[in-house]
Image (cartoon, grey):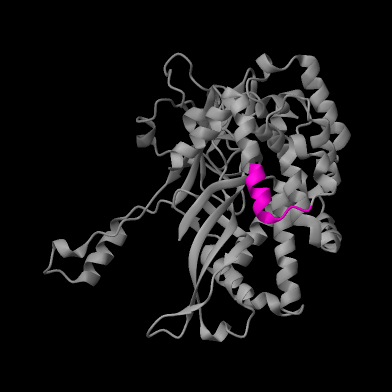
Amino acid sequence: MEVLELPTAYLSDFEVLQAILQSEQERASREGGGGGKKRQPKNLMQVEADVKAHLHDRPCAHQTEEHIAAFLEAAIHSGLTKSEKLQILNHQPRSLVELHVLLQEAEERFSEEQLGQILAMIHQHLPIQPPSDAEDGDEEEGEYPAEEGDEAAAEGDAMDEDEDATAGQDAHYDGEEYMADATDDIMFDTSKYQNDEDDLADGGDDNE
Amino acid sequence: MFVLVKFSDSVRIAPADFRKKLSDAVIDELNKKYANKVVKRVGLCISLFELHSVGDPLVVPADGCTHVKVTFTYIVFRPFVGQILSGRIKKCTPEGVFVTLGFFEDILIPADQLQENTVLCVPRCVLAPALCDHLPLFFPRAHGGPMPCSNIDTSHVTWVLAGSDHEEQVWVWNYFDNKLYMDVENRIRFRIVEHVYFEQFKKPTAATPGAFPAEEQADTSEAAPTQPPFSLIAAANQDGLGLEKWWQ
């Protein structure tokens, strides 16, 4: 085993949830429906179930591709870095103090007015999280398989933000290209903001 | 908190799986090998994202299986340092607060990384009288209930005695006059500070040729600490961090 690239891209909670639902779908269809689950390795079933349980408890359970595309498009000129947008999508802060935690040096980079605008953007484009109930999970699973085919590509674009946010709807990236794009973007984005770069670099150094 | 990592590996496909499509057999093998496993210095592997290339299956002498070189990307749990995550409190110990994400349980917020003026409340029953002498602080319930003692101990961690309303030890944030309990199962938000990887080494048996290898091995495995291969150190010492309900 060899690690070729670490990491090639950062995924939002939503993308992970979709990827897991999709891979479950694929396996089910491959095994011809019922009884197929038994053949899957236990470790995979376990971790996928746990991750799904965790993610269904998070804001991403109520997000759709449209929500994310709309938010990213709106956030193009907000001055948020890529990792900040990712965290906002994962956490959906509803109050100023929650937003503050997610941003690097928020006080120096943003005025109160701007922070208010970002919050308004979150309220406008991302779904309000209803109180969790048991049915959520089933709905999601039922909804997505229909558009399975384009999902991976479209999700990829959700991460490609800035320039690519508008291209999100029509893109037909293949996997390789998307990977390269995503990494380039991160490099570019982080170099713009010293602090952010430090952060990500730290993460890397720890693990070299 | 999830990333895509590109790996290359050689996959061994058993003859029983020859009836499957090659790519399906490869996917199954990769999931069997990687899912829910920690890769050193990388993170916790979750699920296969996509296959990039699948080489030709090769047969090696004395093995009925085929071996295939593949490159693929895997979804890996690897939060970057500084990332904010949200999980549930698993337990409170003098070390700090342990947090679980469901699929990943080895997250520790050390005591000195909690909000300022956070103290550990220990229920009366667990404190043997003799033990109390060794604790920095000891405040009986009769004298105003659980309270940090500001004039004796200046260190961050202060021991106090909890009332009967909490049966387990619990960290309490003294926010002005409010006591905010960090009870088990509550949602907590925290910032990742550090990744910790732990590798369990097997001692070479060659050093003591006389000893039975099996015995040697048993000894080392007993002595080895049960540290998880991958754990995270986190912090919750900032406005907005800590229990989510504090900030709503």
B18 relative to A103, above or below: below
Membership of A180 in magenta stretch:
yes
Residue A89 visible, this orientation: no
Membership of B33 in magenta stretch:
no
Q: Position of residue A192 (x, y in %)?
A: 62, 25
Number of numbered discs visible in the structure rendering: 0
Q: Residue A126 or B91: which is nearer the viewer?
A: A126
Residue at 55 percent across and 27 percent down: it is B146
Q: Residue B174 or A135: which is nearer the viewer?
A: A135
Residue at 51 percent across and 29 percent down: it is B113
For residue A172, side relative to residue B228 (left or right):
right
Residue at 84 percent across and 49 percent down: it is A170
Residue A56 visible, this orientation: yes
Q: To which quarter of the image does residue A35 belong?
A: bottom right
For residue B62, side relative to residue A45 (left or right):
left
B103 relative to B212, above or below: above
A207 relative to B214, above or below: above
Q: Residue furthest left?
A: B210
Q: Quadrant of the N terminus of chain B?
A: top right
For residue A59, side relative to residue B239 (left or right):
right
Q: Position of residue B114 (x, y in %)?
A: 54, 29
Q: Quadrant of the C terminus of chain B?
A: top right
**Residue range highlighted in magenta:** A172-182
Q: Residue A86 or B89: which is nearer the viewer?
A: A86
Q: Residue A28 or B126: which is nearer the viewer?
A: A28
Q: Position of residue A67 (x, y in %)?
A: 84, 42
For residue B128, side relative to residue B115 (left or right):
left
Residue at 25 percent across and 62 percent down: it is B219
Secondary structure, magenta segment, majority class: helix
